[in-house]
Image (cartoon, rainbow, N blue to C red):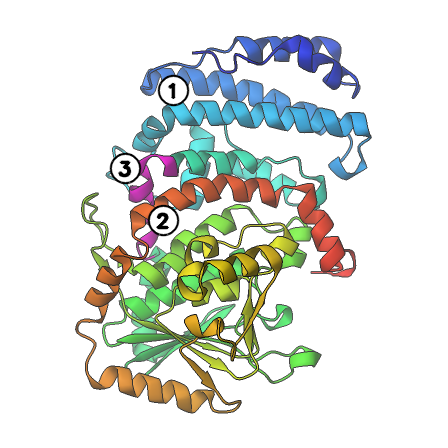
């Protein structure tokens, strides 16, 4: 089948030439784009042929963008040309991945016998089919570019994963792969058991009786999240779930040094917006954070074998969240995968993703279950803040605790929870999910989220919002 029957070179040529791009190269590129035939049936041979041809054309498109001034400094004609090129190369990537997604995933995973993490899978695909997806070296080179000047190499990563999750078998298999313990976590387990705790760069995890306490610690940024904090959180969650003598997990923010909150604990302030603005937050973080640490909190750990008819064969434990000061953005998203939430009086949770220009993780799927559809829409679309004592917050906050009483409240809750034993806790969590959010529903959500979030992450509106609401120009890493 044709790649794009509606692609007419004469329609697009004037817009590209108006930006000063070389006429002969533009004519050749548009003609080859329009004439590319993508196979109607996918197999290893047709995939290799289509990916090779598409990768070559996509690389030429990015080269045209690189020949233009930085994105934020372009004239109207240059901006229009750049936007058109991005649309054409992402459409080509989507067309190839749509046809070949099952074949691609089967080849990368050796017919589903191999589990491979998101961040490894996408770069193996980039190496195997050059040009179709950005290489690790290309993204490392681009990491020195401000977000406002990026044309969107990462967009094709979002498209690749969107199409992967569109395929039921591949999507569920990959979710299983990301629910398995990290090798780094397994390597730390004996030390964690022996010492009763371990301190990572951004998370501290320790054992108290039969409870595993995870303390979030990124004090300079009010416990904001990024790719590094997410990786440490996942390790900590793995350790709590793997520890043979821990029956329940506790998630709590660490103390903050910020002048405004000095000495107080903060649960979380959301994604590190400064890092986004500076172009230092990789798109993949938005995927890996949700399908690894947050999913492990909600679904537990998967084992070494996979059966597509048995996605709930997991090792899991109940989790308590202790919210102090606020749980903003990603902090709020963490609350939506908890089994019980204690909140300090005067604290609140919110999802200001609209002002940031991004999708608030999986909150669009989960928040309404706790606060109702109307309040969820107001929270996600119109910045509603949920105060701990408010009626709407009661759907997610199980108990409001007086300031200074959180330690005692945590101990009381754990004592009550463990008093009757936890033998059925994992089983009850599994059957509760059947009517709430099973992996199949989650897979379909991620099929949309993966690409939409990529476009949001690379959108000029994101930069405008950060400058308007976050004073991003003045903030430094």
Residue at 75%, 55% in the rendered image? 468
Q: Nearer the viewer, residue 215 or 455?
A: 455
Is residue 155 covered in magenta? no
Residue at 50%, 39% in the rendered image? 451
Q: Which residues are magenta?
A: 165-181
Residue 148 relative to residue 297: left or right = right
Element type at mark 1:
helix
Residue 158 relative to residue 246: left or right = right
Is residue 177 covered in magenta? yes
Mark 3, residue position? 169
Picture coordinates of residue 1, whole percent (x, y): 42, 11
Circle 3 crowding by C-alpha within 10 Å: few under 14, some 14–19, many from 20: some
**Tag nearer the camera, 3 or 1:** 3
- Identify the mark nearer the N-term, 2 or 1: 1
Element type at mark 3:
helix
- Identify the mark nearer the N-term, 3 or 1: 1
Residue 442 bears which disc, if any? 2
């Amino acid at each position: 089948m044709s790649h794009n029957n509606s692609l007419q070179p004469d329609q697009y040529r004037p817009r590209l030439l108006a930006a000063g791009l070389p006429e002969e190269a533009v004519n050749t590129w548009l003609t080859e784009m329009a004439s590319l035939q993508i196979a109607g049936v996918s197999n290893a041979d047709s995939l290799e042929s289509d990916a090779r041809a598409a990768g070559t054309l996509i690389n030429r498109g990015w080269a045209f963008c690189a020949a233009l001034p930085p994105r934020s400094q372009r004239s109207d004609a240059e901006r229009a040309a750049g936007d058109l090129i991005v649309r054409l190369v992402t459409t080509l990537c989507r067309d190839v991945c749509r046809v070949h997604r099952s074949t691609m995933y089967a080849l990368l995973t050796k017919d589903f016998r191999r589990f491979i993490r998101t961040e490894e899978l996408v770069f193996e695909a980039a190496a195997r089919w050059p040009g179709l997806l950005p290489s690790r070296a290309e993204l490392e080179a681009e990491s020195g570019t401000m977000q406002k000047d990026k044309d969107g190499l990462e967009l094709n990563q979002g498209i690749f994963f969107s199409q992967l999750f569109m395929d039921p078998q591949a999507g569920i298999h990959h979710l299983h792969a990301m629910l398995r313990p990290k090798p780094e976590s397994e390597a730390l387990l004996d030390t964690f058991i022996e010492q009763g705790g371990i301190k990572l760069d951004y998370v501290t995890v320790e054992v108290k009786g039969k409870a595993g306490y995870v303390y979030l610690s990124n004090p300079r940024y009010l416990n904001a999240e990024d790719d590094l904090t997410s990786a440490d959180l996942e390790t900590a969650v793995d350790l709590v779930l793997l520890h043979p003598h821990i029956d329940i997990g506790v998630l709590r923010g660490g103390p903050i040094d910020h002048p405004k909150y000095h000495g107080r604990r903060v649960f979380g302030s959301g994604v590190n917006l400064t890092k986004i603005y500076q172009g230092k937050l990789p798109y993949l973080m938005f995927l890996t954070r949700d399908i690894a640490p947050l999913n492990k909190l909600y679904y537990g750990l998967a084992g070494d074998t996979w059966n597509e008819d048995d996605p709930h064969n997991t090792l899991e434990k109940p989790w308590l969240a202790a919210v102090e000061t606020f749980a903003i953005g990603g902090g709020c998203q963490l609350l939506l995968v908890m089994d019980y939430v204690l909140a300090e009086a005067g604290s609140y949770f919110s999802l200001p993703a609209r002002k940031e220009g991004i999708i608030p993780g999986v909150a669009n799927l989960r928040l309404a279950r706790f606060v109702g559809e109307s309040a969820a829409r107001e929270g996600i679309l119109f910045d509603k803040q949920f105060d701990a004592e408010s009626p709407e917050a009661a759907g997610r906050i199980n108990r409001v605790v007086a300031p200074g009483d959180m330690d005692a409240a945590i101990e009381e809750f754990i004592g009550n929870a463990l008093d009757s034993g936890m033998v059925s806790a994992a089983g009850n969590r599994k059957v509760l999910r059947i009517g709430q959010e099973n992996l199949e529903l989650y897979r379909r959500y991620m099929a949309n989220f993966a690409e939409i979030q990529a476009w949001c992450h690379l959108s000029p509106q994101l930069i405008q919002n950060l400058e308007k609401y976050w004073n991003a120009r003045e903030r430094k890493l």
